[in-house]
Image: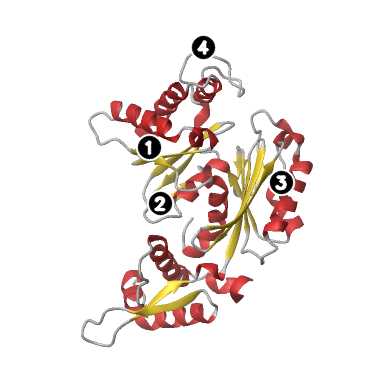
Amino acid sequence: MAGGANLAGLRGHNAALVLALLRRAGLRGEPGPGRGELAEATGLTPQAVSKITARLVAEGLVAEAGRGASTGGKPRTLLRLVPEAGHAVGAQLDRDELRVVRVDLLGRVVAEWRGPLDFGAGPELVVAAVTDTVIRACAAGTPWGVGVAAPGPLDHRTGVLGRVTGYPGWEGYPLREVLAERLGLPVVVDKDTNAGAAAGGAGPGSGSSVYVHVGTGLGAGLRLGGAVYRGSGSGAGEFGHQVLLLDGPPCRCGARGCAEVLCLDAVARGDFVRAARVLGEAAANLVALLDVDRVQLGGRVVAAAPEVFVEGVRTVLAARALGRAPAVVERAPGGVAEGAAELVLAPYFGQA
C-alpha cells in the first residue's frame, strides 16, 4: 500500500475519529490540532490519543506540523494528515463517456483520464474499458480501493445494476463483483448521483443537501444529516422521473411530463433559462419534502452554463420558500468521479 499504510489498523473507530479531525483541518487549510485538542474533540483520553497518533505517524499517515503558540507551558506539537500517504481511484461511467481520477487522502485529484464510452454496448465492452483505465491509474501505486459511479438504479450493497432506463441489457449485472475480480482490489459501486452527493461531503461542513445532476439524464443524490441517504432498497434519488406536467411529452421511462424530459428537451433547444426553471421546480419539490438547506448543481449541462442554472434554480426556490429562508443554491464542489473515490475513502474517516 502507498506510504506503507496498514489498512487493518485504520478500521478502528477511535483512529477514524482522529483522522477525520486531521482531514477536516487539512481541507480547510488550517494548522493541525495538537494531541490535547484531539483528545478534547474526540472524548478520548490523552493516553489513547498518544497511542493512536504514534501508530499513525509510524504508518506514515500523520506527521508533525510544527509547534503551536504557548499558553504558559510547553508549546504543543501540531499534527497533520499526510495527503500523499494513500490514494483512491474513482470512475464515472456516463452513457457516452468514461472519466477516471486518482485522488489523495484529501480528495484532491492528482491524475485524470477521460475517454469515450458506449454504455449501450453492454457490460463486457464497458467493463473492459473501465478495467484498462483503472489499471493505468494504479500504475503509480496500489490505491486503497476503487469507487465506481454508474447510472441507476442499482443496489449499492451488492453492486448489482437494476433496470437502467434505456439499457435493459444491464439489469442484474454484478458490476462490483466482476470489477473486483479483474482488478484484485476492493471495489465500491454506487449511483452516479450518490457519488456526486459524496463529493459534496468531502469538504468541510455537513448537514442536509441535495446534489442535482444534469447530464445525459437527470437525477439527484441526497445527503441527510451528513451521510449519503440511499433508501431501504438503494433507490432513493430518482429525481428526474417526478411528473411535472400531466399528459406532457413522453419520457424514456414510460411516463409523460417527467422533469427529465422537460429539462433535457429545453437543453436540446438551447433554452437553458427554461431548463433551469424546470430544474428549479423539481428541486423545490424535493426541498419542501425533505427540508434540506443546500442544493448543489453538477453535470456537464450545468457546466456549460453554470450561472444560468444557479440563478434559475435559486429564483424558483426563493419564490417557493413559503416564508422561510430558501435553500442555498451553488455549483457542486466536486465531480462524480471524485465522489466515487470519496466513497472509498469515507469509511476510513468515520463517514458513510
Q: What's the CA distance linking mark 1 and mark 2?
A: 14 Å
Q: Which is more N-terminal, label 2 or label 1?
A: 2
Amino acid type indicated by mark 1? Leu
Amino acid type indicated by mark 4? Asp
In this view, 49 is above or below 283 = below
Mark 2 touches mark 3? (CB < 8 Å): no
Amino acid type indicated by mark 2? Gly
Where is mark 3, residue-wise? 174
Mark 4 touches mark 2? (CB < 8 Å): no
Mark 1 touches mark 3? (CB < 8 Å): no
Residue at 71%, 52% in the rendered image? 133
Q: What's the CA distance linking mark 4 and mark 3?
A: 36 Å
The disc label shown at residue 226, or none:
2
- Element at label 4: loop
- Near-viewer residue (162 or 321): 321
Q: Which is more N-terminal, label 2 or label 4?
A: 2
Disc 1: CA contacts within 10 A as few (<14), some (14-19) or many (>=20): some
Amino acid type indicated by mark 3? Pro
- Relative to 237, is 155 on the left or the right? right
Q: Which is more N-terminal, label 1 or label 4?
A: 4
Q: What is the quadrant of residue 250 in the picture?
A: top right
Q: What is the quadrant of residue 300 in the picture?
A: top right
- Farthest residue, direction left: 72
- Relative to 335, is 310 on the left or the right? left
Where is mark 1, residue-wise? 290
Q: Which is more N-terminal, label 3 or label 1?
A: 3
In this view, 310 is above or below 204 = above
Where is mark 4, residue-wise? 247
Q: What's the CA distance linking mark 2 and mark 3?
A: 29 Å
